[in-house]
Amino acid sequence: MSDAAIPEVPAKLQKWRSEGQTVDVMGKQIWYHDPGPKTDDAVFIVHGYPGSSWDFQGVVDRIGPDTRTVVMDMRGFGLSEKPLDGSYQERYTLQLQADLYEGLAYQLGLKTIILVAHDMGQTVGLELMARFEEGRTPFRIRHAILLDGSTLIDMIKPTPFQLEALNKPAVALPQDMSWSDIEAMFHGSFSKESAARPDYQDILTSMSHQVHHDHGSRVIGQIVHYLKERKEGFDRWSRTLFTFEHAPMTLIWGEQDPVAVIAMADRIKKERPVTDLYKYPDCAHWPSIEYPDRLGDAVIARLGSV
């Protein structure tokens, strides 16, 4: 892909990138955004696939500068390192991503968190929740907010891109994807209301830049093999989803989501009736991007939970 084909980085993404930093976590170069007060109590956000920390920039703005809000780019996403060698099992597993979140939290001295987790990150978040129940995390989870995600892999409706990638070896591509192919991954996963927004193209451009950075499009198909790992860990993660007892849990879900269908949220609510469920009829797969103020207000309302 020629440089001439790449749009300019939108201003909001430039600002987001300028506010973060890269640190060594377990020998990995990991980028994170943490502009708030350096307290040991924080909102700790786990993004989804094929997104990045940027997906939550509007939520962070809504929560405001007086609350510590930490958002990390998973390995292989955003501005974190994206190794092109090795297999999925060697470089990008859900378990490794959970290790990195746990490691960053330890380095930052986080003791109590409100966990917010989306999509692929929903399962990473559930692994952190399972470890917390087992007494293995450096932090206490005082509320878990889970967004659209297909941890219930038996109900998933894979996209054509996912199906194609799953039929290929779990290794990096030899060359970058085209810009139009990157944008196509995202287009169609937004609600009809969001697609009509005047800034919709800037949203697609920002998300695509985060994938494209440092040859990330070469590994995004490799990372989609996390869907197979979800099948392998289904019993552990679904049990946590249905029986988590150590803190309140809230579901926030877009009803127009074409992959993590709304029936998943209904099933979780049925299995764990004490779960708070909020459905957004005008939202698809990306609540943090489509309605950041709404999601931010939901986090703010839970800042006082114990």
Image (spheres, rainbow, N blue to C red):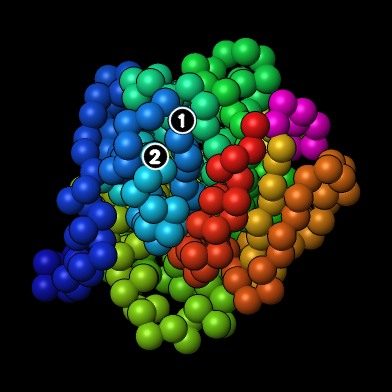
Whether residue 127 is situated above or below residue 135 in the rendered picture: below
In the rendered image, residue 146, in percent from the top left (x then y), is placed at 63, 47
| Between 226 and 41, the one nearer to me in the picture | 41
In the rendered image, residue 4, in percent from the top left (x then y), is placed at 11, 73
- The quarter holding residue 23 reads top left
Residue drawn at x 57%, y 13% as measured from the top left = 136
In the rendered image, residue 295, in percent from the top left (x then y), is placed at 55, 59
* Residue 133 in sight here: yes
Residue drawn at x 52%, y 27% as measured from the top left = 112
Residue numbers of the magenta segment:
241-247
Inspect the image, locate mark 2, and give the three-letter code of the amino acid beneath it: Arg
Q: Earlier in the sequence, mark 1 or mark 2?
A: 1
Residue drawn at x 19%, y 60% as measured from the top left = 14
Name the residue that disc number 1 marks. Answer: 41
| Between 257 and 113, the one nearer to me in the picture | 113
In reply to whether residue 243 is colored magenta, the answer given is yes
* Residue 257 in sight here: no
Q: What secondary structure is marked by label 1?
A: strand
> Which numbered marker is on residue 190?
none
Name the residue that disc number 2 marks. Answer: 68
Residue drawn at x 60%, y 51% as measured from the top left = 301
In reply to whether residue 17 is colored magenta, the answer given is no
- The quarter holding residue 79 reads top left
Which residue sits furthest top? Answer: 135
What is the quadrant of the C terminus in the image? top right
Looking at the rendered structure, the number of numbered marks drawn on it comes to 2
Inspect the image, locate mark 1, and give the three-letter code of the amino acid beneath it: Asp
- CA separation in Å, label 1 and label 2: 7 Å
Q: Are marks 1 and 2 in contact (CB under 8 Å)?
A: yes
Whether residue 94 is situated above or below residue 191 in the rendered picture: above
